[in-house]
Amino acid sequence: MGFKARHPLPALEISVRPGLALRSFSLHDDKELFAVVDDNREHLRQWLAFLDLTTSVERILPFLNNCVQGYLDGTSCRFALVVDGAIGGAVGLEDISAQNRRAKIGYWLAQPLQGQGCITAAVRALLEYGFEDRGLNLIEIRAASANTKSRAIAERVGMALDGVLRQREWLYDHYVDLASYTLLADEWRSTQR
């Protein structure tokens, strides 16, 4: 994996495989990111609650500001999932706790890119980054219990199901249970040999 810094904003790029990279978000991603969200609104709405908040380019700016601020203060590290040079989704380490050395991974992907292994490869890259570069001990993925595709990603990368958190998230007009998957640094390292 390749890491390189760019100016003027602190930026990080992780090469995942040919044609697939993770690039930290910048404020300049506003129009492209909004277009991807807008084009995939119906697809994303099934499992993600942010769609009603992102109805214009201007309304995506608070998310991008939060990405930059989280990167600067160490509480999150969110990336544009770049496929063949264009943003195709988002992935990131969120709720990073330096004291407890833990974080959560979140992700979404444009519908035309599904089934190509993009998110699985991106999650593996984030696990390496989180455990090796950030010194985390535990990384978690939470997915709606009925979201079998998202749960399959956690299982594919070797995470263990810790349990189901009942009615943990409000999704437009109802609560959803979240399946919590975790992986420890030692477990991940034992699979990398």
Image: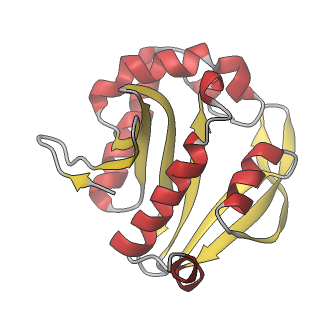
Q: Is residue 169 above or below residue 102?
A: above
Spot occupied by residue 5 in the image (x, y as percentages of width and height): 17, 50
Spot occupied by residue 10 in the image (x, y as percentages of width and height): 20, 48
In the image, taking residue 25 as reference, residue 116 lies left or right, namely right
x 40%, y 34%: residue? 19
Question: Which part of the image, by quadrant, shows the N terminus?
Answer: bottom left
Spot occupied by residue 62 in the image (x, y as percentages of width and height): 41, 33
Q: Is residue 190 above or below residue 147?
A: below
x 48%, y 50%: residue? 92
Spot occupied by residue 151 in the image (x, y as percentages of width and height): 76, 53
x 27%, y 50%: residue? 12
Q: Is residue 118 above or below residue 46?
A: below
Q: Quadrant of residue 107?
A: top right
The answer to whether residue 193 of the structure is visible from this angle is yes
In the image, taking residue 113 as reference, residue 80 lies left or right, namely left
x 47%, y 58%: residue? 126
Q: Residue furthest left?
A: 8
